[in-house]
Amino acid sequence: MATNTTISAPAQVISPEELLQHWQGHRQLTRRVIVAFPEDKLFNYSIGGMRPFAGLAEELTGLASGGIKGVATGKWPRINELEHHSDKPLPATKEEILKQWDEVTEEIEALWPQISPERFHDVEKAFGMYEGPIYANFLYLVDNEIHHRGQGYVYLRSLGIEPPPFWDRF
Amino acid sequence: MATNTTISAPAQVISPEELLQHWQGHRQLTRRVIVAFPEDKLFNYSIGGMRPFAGLAEELTGLASGGIKGVATGKWPRINELEHHSDKPLPATKEEILKQWDEVTEEIEALWPQISPERFHDVEKAFGMYEGPIYANFLYLVDNEIHHRGQGYVYLRSLGIEPPPFWDRF
């Protein structure tokens, strides 16, 4: 028989370690999409007035870097400028984009173990704006990356470039 | 003090109810993207040789319908045909696509409560092909929808149509 305590706690089915793996797997794939762009197209090519993929990558870098700090410490950087979500300098080459990307990967690995399991249901305003439980804002961050990366796939296809396989997250 | 049993069980931080809400929220948004397409563009418009959005929506409908059956019952339909993942007839109009979409929404609501929390770590071959824990295959299914919907956003923008806001999942 379950005790009353067990009954009152809702069952949870995904662990922090699994969420970390989920996130970093997606970030590995997005990194490969950045690599797949020719240098000039990364900064200049767009469809329908949307940002070039360098602009999207820059947003994702800033949100991931600010996001891991907010999730781990509760200190959320504010988004003051929609086009540049980061305290890092604007990268001007593919190499610089990838360097910042890899720095954020290390930040995530370093900060993630500090997050307690209870933390994921704290309700906060992520980036000073988006109120919700941490787990939901975290999923939003990953979803936003998948969404923009999907745009990148269309850019690559329209350039005649085969994108990296969607299922490859390692 | 925690007991040994508590220590040996890894902490889990997302509940089945939260995963259901996450999924259905995304499906609501994708439904609005389908609605946003003009009837002819839904079936005929594409970029870079990719499928028109009707083809993507059809894939998502089939995967969601088969996916909820597999997750809930362990009976996974097999994917024999990449272009049509469903046992449902191919829809020929936007109205039919939306009708199937809404039927799957109801299937999900009906079957989800049958899924036990322990089920999310069962390891199975989803759709007879993709071996992994249920939670990971479930996230993959949602990610695949976000990915293809991101393509739909580019199609809409390139047609001069403002897509529904990404943050609106209700």
Image: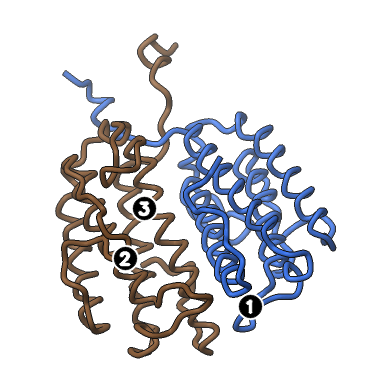
Chain colours: A brown, B blue
B168 lies left or right of B86: left
Alpha carbon distance from label 1 to label 2:
29 Å
* Count of numbered labels shown in the rendering: 3
- Residue at left offset 40%, top offset 61%: A145
Residue B157, given in percent of the width and then of the height, sits at 57, 70
Instruction: Relative to B10, say whether B95 is above or below.
Output: below
B17 lies left or right of A56: right
Residue at the disc numbered 1: B50
Helix, strand or loop at label 1? It is loop
| Residue B10 appearing in the image | no
Residue A9, given in percent of the width and then of the height, sits at 38, 20
Q: State yes or no: discs 3 and 1 in contact (Cβ < 8 Å).
A: no
Locate the C terminus of chain B and report the quarter of the image it occupies: top right
Nearer the observer: mark 1 or 2; the answer is 2
A128 lies left or right of A168: left
Residue at the disc numbered 3: A141
* Outermost residue toward the top in this view: A4
Residue at the disc numbered 2: A83
Helix, strand or loop at label 2? It is loop
Nearer the observer: mark 2 or 3; the answer is 2
Residue B104 sits in quarter? top right
Locate the N terminus of chain B and report the quarter of the image it occupies: top left
Disc 1 marks a residue whose amino acid type is: Met
- Residue at left offset 61%, top offset 34%: B112
- Residue at left offset 67%, top offset 43%: B69
Alpha carbon distance from label 2 to label 3:
16 Å
